[in-house]
Image (spheres, rainbow, N blue to C red):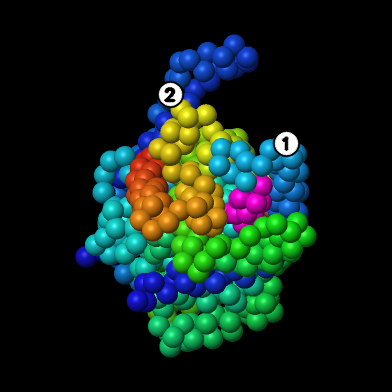
Amino acid sequence: MKAFKKYVSLLKMSMQVSFTYRFNFLINAISGVVFITSLYYVWKAIFAQRAELNGLTWEHMQSYLLVVFISNMLLSWYSETAISRRVMDGSVSMDLLKPIDFQKARLSETLGTSLVEGGICIIIAVIWAFMFTGVQVPPDASSAALFLLSLLLSVFIKFGIVYLSGLLCFYTTSMLGVAWARAAITNLFSGALVPIALFPDWLGTFAKLLPFQGIVAIPASLYMGQLSGMTALGQIGIQLFWAIVLWLAGKALWRWSVRQVTIHGG
Amino acid sequence: MSVIEVSSLSKQFKQAVKEPGLKGSIKHLFTQNYRTKNAVDGIDLQIEEGDAVAYVGPNGAGKSTTIKMLSGILVPTSGSVKVNGIVPHQERMRHAKQIGVVFGQRTQLWWDLPIRESFSLLKDIYEIPEQEYKRNMDRFRELLSLDEFMDQPARKVSLGQRMRADLAAALLHSPPIIFLDEPTIGLDINVKVRIREFIKEVNRDQGSTVLLTTHDLEDIKDICRRLVIIDKGRIIYDGSLDKVKDAFAKERKIYFQVSEAAPTLLESLSRMPGVVLEIQEDTKFSVEFNRFQHSAGQIAAFVMERVEVVDFRIDEPSIDHIIRKLYDGELSIEEGYGAEAAK
């Protein structure tokens, strides 16, 4: 129990720090709003010509965009790059001196930041939804609950991906390059730019084999109440599966990287 | 059993060798040549509990590399390290609890948090019992005057303040073993004195074992009883602080002031083997001699027999002088006691 307390303290600490960096978050939020608003108008123009696109209606699409926004904001750029920055500036070696698990510590920090920023972004999301009426709330309580669970899992998946790409900075000095590549791949395969349902078949099948769908596509479909019963739980299961796989992969990569670094010198 | 046991410890780094110019860079893309560098080259070191050891050597001698291996950040290429029975890089978490480490060039405080909060976070991370935390905190606050800046985030305090906070942070969990890598680097004299006092007190009162690297000779004289000198990855001296003089300084210098000018004396002095004569005035001169060839008594007697001596003093070579000479590479292992110590 005591061993767990240190991670809770780290989580609280990072909540505190994210208030210090409120300006950072604000900028991030503004760019998020701009991004989502432009997507909104693009899709609005597309749906002006037709009522339905591969089974998606304009109403669906608006809800979808809301989920994209929330999911993007839950893990901000700042907390994303925090891990790679740690690797780049060498403070990793100070982490090795502390009786604390690196991966769990970073997860605690990320969750702490996400709690603060997530809270704020929900307020922004509500305002956004209010301004552009037409966004629907989940059809019933159970889809709402499943959506929240799925959103939580999406944070773990995103953390897993961010953590892995952060550790890549042990091998390359191009921290921004890695972060941008990761963001581009995530945006495409998570369905943040275009819903996976609209992908060509082969790309859609491919996307379903990857972990990224768990970041936007799955929470979004649960939000819209498109899935029911076992299918919904199955999707949550896929998210859980990826969250665990990514966690273990992160653990393995960390162990391997640390061995490399401690053997060859930082 | 010694607290720290190091035997034939070596660390090699691979360094990429790149030929100069654009051609070299392009070539490097395809074929990488590496050169191995022996940062630490077969070190043996035993440190007893409660000892305070200065680990000294020029830049790049292998000091920090040794400290990093002792603290578990680097894995040795060969040889063995044991700290309190633990192999540092194998049991990192358990090891972390028994050591306190300060790297003068880095901080372990959270940049954006008030220093007070960094401490309470460390309390949880190291699972320090409330009572112990309070006791240490009260002591450190007084000894290091932390109260002046406890509410400031680490990024806003001065280097001296940050260093004091870092020391407190490293020792908060009362580690029995303390590694300090240049803890006084870049600090003003007042802060240095204060930090020295603090380290001394921790070493004396808690009986903590201290290993300290520094370029500041006052640090060494003030805190440490034992001196280990490393150069090019090898230990070239290991012994007490006083003995280093005997080991390396073979020159002694006697200053004479005599009642009248004595040109014949000076001439015969200057012809003695192993003697360097320096004349300041007619009646003031100094004689530098190799103490393995002449004793001070012989030289003094030689002068006194020939002229009336008004005043004289013997110059002991200072530790500063010796270490500076070591850094310059003027003293080598082959000389004096160092050779025996190295065996």
Looking at the image, residue B9 sits to the left or right of residue B59; the answer is left
Please provide percent x and percent y for residue B23.
59, 11
For label 1, the crowd category at 10 Å Cα-Cα, with few meaning under 14, some 14 to 19 and many 20 or more, is few
Report the amino acid beneath label 1: Gln
Front residue of A261 and B205: A261
**Would you name the residue on which mark 2 appears?**
B34
Please provide percent x and percent y for residue B209.
38, 68
**Would you name the residue on which mark 1 appears?**
A49
Closer mark to the observer between disc 2 and disc 1? 1
Residue B10 lies in the magenta-colored region: no
Residue A60 lies in the magenta-colored region: yes
What span is colored magenta in the figure?
A: A58-72
Front residue of A83 and B118: A83
Please provide percent x and percent y for residue B136.
48, 82
What's the residue at 49%, 63% (across, down)?
A: A143
Which residue is at the far left?
B1
What's the residue at 65%, 77% (across, down)?
A: B150
What's the residue at 75%, 48% (across, down)?
A: A37
Residue B316's disc is: none
Report the amino acid beneath label 2: Tyr
Element type where label 1 sits in the image = helix
Residue A38 against residue B311 in the figure, above or below: above
Looking at the image, residue A32 sits to the left or right of residue B336; the answer is right
In the rendered structure, the residue with mark 1 lies on which chain?
A
Could one spot residue B137 in this view of the protein? yes
Which residue is at the far front?
A51
